[in-house]
Amino acid sequence: MEALKKFDGQYWKNLFDSRVGKTTWPYGSGVWSKKEWVLPEIDSDHIVSAFEGNSNLFWAERYGKTVLGMNDLWVKHCGISHTGSFKDLGMTVLVSQVNRLRKLGKPVVGVGCASTGDTSAALSAYCAAAGIPAIVFLPANRISMAQLVQPIANGAKVISLDTDFDGCMQLIREVTAELPIYLANSLNSLRLEGQKTAAIEILQQFDWEVPDWVIVPGGNLGNIYAFYKGFQMCKELGLVDRIPRMVCAQAQNANPLYLHYKAGWDTEFKPVTAGTTFASAIQIGDPVSIDRAIFALKNCDGIVEEASEEELMDAMSQADLTGMFICPHTGVALAALIKLRNSGVIQPNDRTVVVSTAHGLKFTQSKIDYHSNAIPDMASRFANPPIEVKADFGAVMDVLQKRVLSEYQ
């Protein structure tokens, strides 16, 4: 930080803004356009990048106004990335560093991770691009098929284990302690250095104006800290004069941080056994970045909120019905926003950013089940199933009169 402080905030704004949309290697990446703040001494020839980042900051006008009575709601679509999730932002940094170590002759045979889906996809893609072996530990039958096929297609060694994510995490830590395999989970701070650039990017996209609230889904909890760090660096280095309040949104079935927040930060943190949730990527009961997350939330006057399965699926589906196509984890964040709006914590004119962590196409089965009314004990209030009609003009006209035109009369 002392080295970075030799330049004022305006210098950094001008530098970062000058790189947006350019193809000069490696600055066309939303991560590496902030190279000096991420991994300054790495040689550009060692960087492994798919020009990740630079993701859409979407004005959710219709959703904000019709569902929440809000005028200034935005969704940061981090899932519009190379492998379809925000994990690319951190993985480009970690794999680049491994690539550097290997080229320097260090004894690193490969890179390994435990994953609930998205981490394995990002690791596998970037390792494949660099020709580095990837080893992935996944909990059997607990991730979507779309997520499973990504590491398989990219040539990773996929090990399916009869345990949950926390069990996979314990095993990969034991394995990487014994073998020359580099640990790629967000326990490794290199990941967070890349992920923090999404926060800087939000400020950049608002012409360096600070939003009032940023809501982030939380599982292993590295991302909530990474966003805090990005905002805090911008403040400390003079690019902005304050940071937003942050909300960490958890699924009710995997909510250890929420329970700790409700019990008071000064109590002892207690892990939980995570239950099944449609937000499978945050189905984590013993998050490795718990201390970082607590530090971040304490220092930004942050809040933790939770969402039930029905709340998160309804929120996701309502968002989709206004033109988005989001993942269940973003549904958790939107459900938290609904609660905070209803309680008056977030006001109608507060500029609020919801971080969307993955592309909805990774979770199509959950959407199909919702719109087919196939989820037990769930009302699926916003389901929109296909209407089966005979291939007959009269039958089609009858359905259109009853089911379409009548809604607009």
Image (spheres, rainbow, N blue to C red):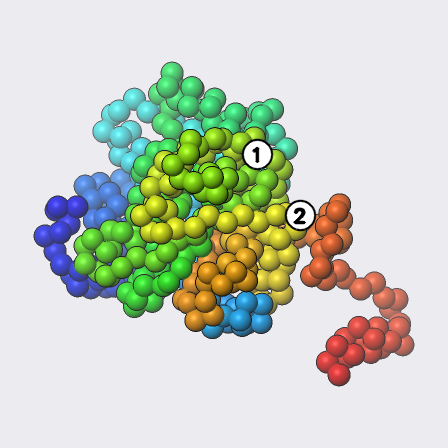
Does residue 146 appear in the picture of this structure? Answer: no
Disc 1 and disc 2 in contact, CB within 8 angstroms: no
Q: Position of residue 304 (x, y in %)?
A: 46, 48
**Residue 243 shown left or right of residue 247 in the figure:** left
Q: Quadrant of the C terminus?
A: bottom right
Left or right of residue 186: residue 71: right
Residue 286 in the image, given as x and y percentages of width and height: 48, 31
The quarter holding residue 138 reads: top right
- Identify the residue shown where x is 31% and y is 38%: 190
- Which of the 4 image quadrants contains residue 66? bottom right
Mark 1 neighbour class, 10 Å CA radius: few under 14, some 14 to 19, many 20 or more: many
Up the image or down, 138 lies above or below 228; here it is above
- Tag 2: amino acid: Gln
Q: 200 above or below 163?
A: below
Q: Is residue 234 above or below residue 124?
A: below
How many numbered marks, from 0 up?
Answer: 2
From this viewpoint, which residue is outermost toward the top? Answer: 178
What is the secondary structure assignment of the residue under circle 1?
loop
Q: Nearer the viewer, mark 1 or mark 2?
A: 1
Frontmost residue, 294 versus 193: 294
- Mark 1 or 2 closer to N-term? 1
Q: Quadrant of residue 76?
A: bottom left
In the picture, the disc for residue 365 is: 2
Q: Is residue 398 above or below residue 204?
A: below
Residue for point 31% across, 33% down: 98
Mark 1 belongs to which amino acid? Answer: Ala
391 with respect to 351 (left or right): right
Neighbours of disc 2 within 10 Å: few (<14), some (14-19), many (20+):
some
Reading the image, the residue beneath label 1 is 274
